[in-house]
């Protein structure tokens, strides 16, 4: 029997138990900087005995900003601001990672002030935007932007960094054959499509040193006709494992499509198959997200060796103290029913659970 409340080591970082708060966009930032409401939110989360809290996705360049309330890590001025989030969590003995999220295809000019960018030029029906194809030298510059962003994350005091490479955002768009049609060194075979992610992981590792924890949230398959298959996703996972990534959070799907990662009304773990396949191919720690609601299910995932830690998002919007309640034995499930109304609230900058 695996004890879900046992500490876990991810490179030099030791987290107190196997529960992780998955990255959650709160849209509470102002002009890319941390607000008092966010400090309050993170303080509350840190009172709940969560092993590791992952911040919402921070934009590494202005071109990557996908919503008005998103926090940035694009300049050195953000360091002192981000440090306030770190302090709010550290003061209660918690650990916090920063996620880097470049919006890519999903960026809207009225938010970012830029045309969306991606591996290939394409028209996006949902947003009515024409995506601009990145030139090869711009992709090299992007690698450097991510490395600089992680330097700022380290200087701000975060315990770890996580790269968002899932759901169709920029890094995962490069991984996907439906979004990446390039024929140069950044497209074609799975290894070439994974090159951007690999170079960023390696760049961060070289800059951060061998001990700093680097995590990746990876979409293992696209659930889209002609999209990245599970076997290709696992190939990508192996490639980034070879770039000394310390843990992978398993996710999947493209925003708003079949296999959507914020699955409506789903209260069962839904990436079990992907994670089990990945487990057989990889030796680094795996984190499973999506539909975790019952303590018994989470315990089974660990007992069966499918993953090493459990990640949740919506249950913490419902109740930031749910892990503490699990530990104290006052409940053994989250009553979040995955209605997704919190998502709408987040878009309005008023993130909260709408269940009574
Ligand atoms: C309001 C909201 C905001 C989210 N923001 C992010 C984000 O910034 N980065 C990310 O990787 N995933 C984000 N997600 C996805 C979650 O991290 C998680 O992968 C997904 O909700 C499935 O987990 P759950 O069933 O525990 O909610 C968000 C989800 C919700 C509901």
Image (tube, helix red, strand yellow):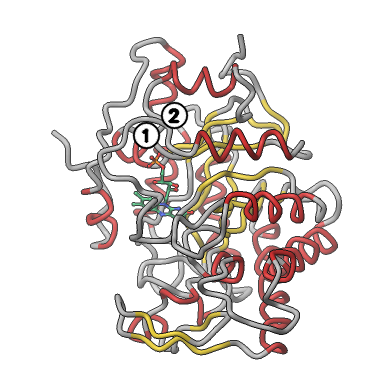
Q: In the displayed orientation, state which residue is furthest to the front.
A: 226
Whether the residues at callouts 1 and 2 have beta carbons within 8 Å, the answer is yes
Instruction: Please tell me the numbered disc located at residue 48.
Output: 2
Residue at (68, 83) in percent of width and height: 183
Residue at (77, 68) in percent of width and height: 199
SS class of the residue under badge 2?
A: loop
Residue 347 spot, x, y in % from top left: 27, 62
Label 1 and label 2: CA atoms lie apart by 6 Å
Q: Nearer the viewer, residue 12 or 291?
A: 291
Q: Nearer the viewer, residue 37 or 97?
A: 97
- 10 Å crowding of disc 1: few (<14), some (14-19), many (20+): many
Residue 348 spot, x, y in % from top left: 23, 62
SS class of the residue under badge 1?
A: loop
330 left or right of 227 in image? left
Q: Quadrant of the C terminus?
A: top left
Return the residue at label 1: 320
> Is 59 placed above or below 140 here?
above
Residue at (40, 10) in percent of width and height: 329
296 left or right of 94 in image? left
């Amino acid at each position: 029997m695996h004890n879900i409340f046992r500490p876990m080591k991810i490179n030099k970082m030791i987290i107190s138990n196997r529960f992780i708060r998955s990255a959650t966009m709160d849209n509470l930032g102002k002009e890319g900087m941390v607000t008092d409401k966010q400090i309050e939110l993170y303080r509350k989360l840190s009172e709940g005995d969560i092993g590791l809290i992952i911040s919402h996705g921070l934009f590494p360049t202005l071109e990557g900003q996908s919503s008005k309330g998103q926090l940035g890590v694009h300049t050195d001025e953000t360091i002192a601001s981000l440090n306030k989030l770190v302090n709010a969590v550290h003061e209660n003995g918690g650990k916090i990672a920063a996620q880097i999220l470049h919006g890519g295809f999903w960026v809207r000019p009225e938010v970012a002030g830029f045309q969306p960018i991606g591996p290939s030029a394409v028209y996006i029906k949902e947003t009515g935007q024409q995506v601009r194809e990145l030139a090869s030298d711009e992709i090299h510059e992007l690698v450097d932007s991510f490395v600089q962003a992680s330097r700022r994350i380290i200087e701000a005091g975060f315990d770890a960094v996580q790269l968002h490479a899932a759901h169709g955002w920029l890094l995962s768009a490069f991984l996907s054959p439906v979004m990446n049609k390039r024929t140069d060194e950044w497209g074609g075979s799975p290894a070439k499509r994974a090159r951007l992610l690999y170079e960023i992981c390696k760049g961060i590792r070289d800059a951060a040193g061998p001990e700093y924890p680097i995590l990746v949230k990876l979409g293992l398959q696209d659930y889209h006709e002609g999209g990245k298959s599970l076997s290709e996703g696992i190939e990508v996972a192996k490639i980034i494992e070879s770039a000394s990534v310390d843990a992978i959070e398993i996710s999947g799907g493209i925003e708003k499509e079949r296999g959507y990662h914020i699955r409506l009304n789903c209260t069962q773990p839904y990436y079990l198959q992907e994670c089990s396949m990945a487990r057989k191919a990889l030796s680094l720690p795996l984190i499973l997200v999506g539909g975790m609601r019952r303590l018994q299910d989470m315990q089974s995932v660990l007992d069966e060796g499918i993953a090493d830690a459990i990640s949740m998002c919506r249950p913490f919007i419902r109740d930031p103290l749910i892990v503490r309640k699990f530990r104290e034995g006052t409940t053994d499930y989250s009553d979040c029913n995955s209605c997704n109304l919190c998502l709408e609230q987040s878009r309005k900058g008023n993130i909260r659970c709408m269940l009574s």
